[in-house]
Image (cartoon, helix red, strand yellow):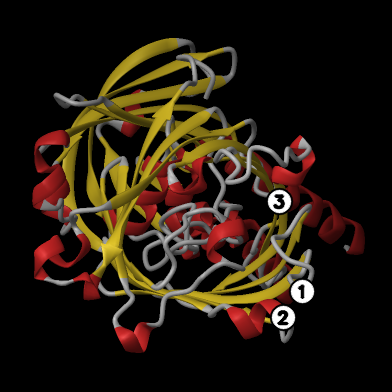
Amino acid sequence: MKLSFVLLFCFACLLSVEVAAQSRYFTKTGHIWFFSEAPLEDIMARNRQVVSFIDFKTGELAFSVPMTAFQFKKSLMQTHFNENFVESGKYPKSTFSGTFSKPGAIDPTKEGTYKVQVEGQLTIHGVEKALSTDGILEVRNGKVRGKATFIVAPHDYDITIPLLVREHIAKEVAVHVDMLYEPFTGNTP
Amino acid sequence: MAKHLLLSLLLLLAPYLMQAQDDLLDLAEALDSTEAGYVSGTFKATRLVNGHSVETNGDQELLFLISHRFGTLNSGAYNLFGLDQATIRLALEYGLTDRLTLGLGRSSLEKTYDGFAKYRILRQLQGAMPVTVTGFSSLAIKTLEQQLPERPTAFSSRLTYTHQLLIARKFTERLSLQLSPTWVHRNMVATRQDENEVYALGLGGRYKLTKRTSFNAEYYYLLPGETADQYRNALAMGFDIETGGHVFQLIFTNAQGMVEKLFIPQTQGAWEEGDVYFGFNISRVFSLKKEGDW
């Protein structure tokens, strides 16, 4: 009887690892970049330290974006971005929490490309707004690549642009998301 | 037996229960490792007012700095309160790395050329390093022709060295303070009484009025000595206004010079008598980085 309990315990442990491994994928080096074309100079920044999770069972998606990790070509621009626009001291992270369509139709172990609809709440500069966009999930070599592009208007997130530089900065900024997800085993640091 | 079965069932369900409990977003935020960051933007510009701030240029960035000081405010309406006359300094500063900046400048006052190196030794880090420390060394060459051409002097007598340790802390988003111990060495001085070595302590800071403007003040206290007796401590106040790639600094100061050797040991103006020079610094940053370097 003791033995049967030990066996069951082992089975439970194995199962727990298996369950987590199957449905949840994650990345800590996700890439998000944005580009804004303006008459005087183009503004572009990239961030390669985005943490993201995707759950193929529940269809949940989560992103945590450290704002100070956005790299600009000019360090002065980066300082201005953090100090004046997104106020990284007060709002260090932007987040997205949502779902993608038809999670049941996607098998993360079977190679293929799937078009999905992503919906959720995007929080930038402490302001939460609903966001819905198209995305692509691509399964290859045991990894899942997630891509999406959407438009953000700084004004919607209470990011004010001073009159003097208003003409230099586009009213809408295209944000590109490129994540390479790996299976999440639950004990990764 | 029933007890064991129940326990086993709980164990079997445990992963599902756990999964239900922790939100994916909480998980993502917990894994994000950029919590502790280096403090940036202690000051808006590489100058506090007259003197240097701890800020250095970014990697492969070229900064073009134009500085002007008009005449004194007390020179009267006839001179439009000093605006009729001006001294100028043009300078280029280049960031070899994020920490090391080299600069070259030319002031019209005493036809002075100056070259400097600035290195960010320590960077303020949340919870680990309370201050940013930058080392500054400059060489200034006075090229104004000698008043007495029949008494030629060696080239070395035209040189002045300035060494500073700039120590600053960003206390809050708005308030940053800086301490600048300074040593000025002059190879040759005009009279026997004048000092070759001048020591001073700079104190300054900024307070942000809005996100893009700040009030700055800076005071250089000359340590007791001959120079302190004959000259005045330099007091400068101004506003930083930042617009995109530019920083404008509007300045009121009792020093006419724009390099250390001029405004630290040679300031003569008295604030209380209205010997105040209005001036400005304008900087523009150019990135020389190639596409794909970053």
Q: Please, is residue B259 above or below residue B231 in the view?
A: above
Q: Nearer the viewer, mark 3 or mark 2?
A: 2
Query: How many C-alpha atoms fall within 10 Å of the one at disc 2: few (<14), some, or many (≥20)?
Result: few
Q: Secondary structure at mark 3?
A: strand
Label 1 residue SS:
loop
Which of the marked residues, 2 or 1, is nearer the chain's N terminus? 1
For label 1, the residue is: B193
Which quadrant holds residue B102?
A: top right
Depth check: B68 or A69 in front? B68
Q: Residue A101: x and y, percent?
A: 25, 33
Residue that carries the numbered disc 2 in the rendered image: B226
**Amino acid type of the residue that numbered disc 1 sits on in the rendered structure:** Gln
- Report the Cα–Cα distance between label 2 and label 1: 7 Å
Question: Which residue in the protein does label 3 denote?
Answer: B160
Q: Are marks 2 and 1 in contact (CB under 8 Å)?
A: yes
The crowd level at tag 3 (other Cα within 10 Å; few <14, some 14-19, many 20+) is many
Rendered location of residue B236, percent (x, y) = 41, 73
User: Is residue B276 positioned above or below A118 on the image?
Assistant: below
